[in-house]
């Protein structure tokens, strides 16, 4: 739940999950069937993406023009819109989908939160951090495979957990953005978006996840955006 140093990325490959990772179990297909239908464009299919916000569009343009993703696939998470946008290593838009995110608006994690159990994490601590993360697949509680966005603070991207009692599938289908704030900080996505888009792209070398802020300015979270207009002007 804070920007992970690149040196920590290798921790995502460890079999032992941090204490707060119990939320990370994948949901069975039966509980995800309706959720899959809300994906605007599957990674393997065609169709137009949902309209992006100005801030999301700025980040997408910056990553594409600066090649900040280093030829790796990436996902842009717009927390205010509760939506994820998927791109391959060449910057081609492949699909987008609704997401569930942390209950509490906020852009930083509570220090030491990765060592807490879910029952020890208070409502004010349940934030999805903003920033640029190098994400890799690894094991979580229950031997489940998840995409670790920030292993040190137990933030992962995965499908809706099994046996949740918060009506997460209905919340994901809802048109009300506030309904999408329900997790302990992890990012829940539809099963088809995860299995047909994220997994094939990220499973070999990982990729980047760019999470837009709730409260901070976008330039504070992504400082390189400040110089992008000058780079655009200098481009032939």
Image (cartoon, grey):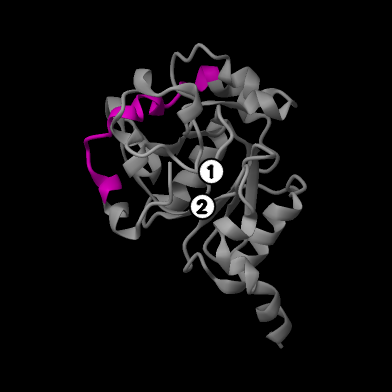
Residue 49, x across and y down, in percent: 73, 48
| Residue 123 point in image, percent of width and height | 49, 22
Q: Badge 2: how crowded within 10 Å, few (<14), some, or many (20+)?
A: many
Report the residue marked by disc 1.
107
Q: Position of residue 234 (x, y in %)?
A: 69, 86
Secondary structure beneath disc 1? loop
Residue 42 in view: no
Marks 1 and 2, the one that precedes in the sequence = 1
- First to last magenta residue range: 11-31
Between 62 and 5, the one lying in front of the other is: 5
Marks 2 and 1: in contact by CB < 8 Å? yes
> Could you tell me if residue 140 is visible in this image?
yes
Up-down relation of residue 120 to residue 76 (above or below): above
| Residue 230, above or below 217 | below
From the top left corner, tell me how far across and down residue 152 is, in percent.
Answer: 32, 43
Label 2: which secondary element: strand
Please give the label number shown on residue 87: none
Say if the magenta span includes residue 25: yes
Q: Judge left or right: residue 49 versus residue 121.
A: right
Q: CA distance from mark 1 to mark 2?
A: 8 Å
- Which residue corresponds to mark 2? 131
């Amino acid at each position: 739940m804070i920007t992970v140093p690149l040196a920590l990325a290798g921790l995502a490959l460890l079999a032992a999950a941090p204490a707060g990772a119990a939320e990370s179990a994948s949901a069975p297909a039966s509980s995800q069937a309706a959720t899959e239908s809300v994906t605007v464009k599957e990674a393997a299919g065609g169709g137009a993406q949902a309209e992006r916000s100005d801030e999301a569009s700025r980040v997408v343009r910056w990553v594409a023009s600066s090649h900040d993703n280093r030829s790796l696939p990436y996902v842009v998470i717009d927390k205010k819109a509760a939506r994820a946008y998927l791109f391959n290593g060449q910057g081609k838009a492949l699909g987008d989908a609704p997401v569930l995110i942390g209950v509490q608006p906020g852009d930083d994690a509570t220090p030491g939160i990765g060592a807490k159990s879910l029952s020890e994490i208070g409502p004010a601590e349940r934030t999805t951090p903003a920033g640029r993360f190098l994400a890799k697949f690894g094991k979580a509680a229950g031997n489940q495979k998840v995409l670790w966005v920030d292993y040190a603070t137990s933030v992962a991207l995965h499908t809706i957990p099994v046996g949740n009692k918060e009506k997460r599938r209905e919340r994901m289908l809802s048109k009300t953005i506030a309904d999408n704030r329900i997790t302990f900080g992890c990012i829940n996505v539809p099963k088809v978006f995860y299995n047909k888009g994220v997994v094939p792209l990220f499973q070999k070398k990982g990729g980047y996840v760019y999470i837009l802020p709730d409260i901070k300015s976008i330039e504070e979270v992504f400082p390189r955006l400040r110089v992008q207009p000058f780079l655009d002007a200098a481009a032939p």
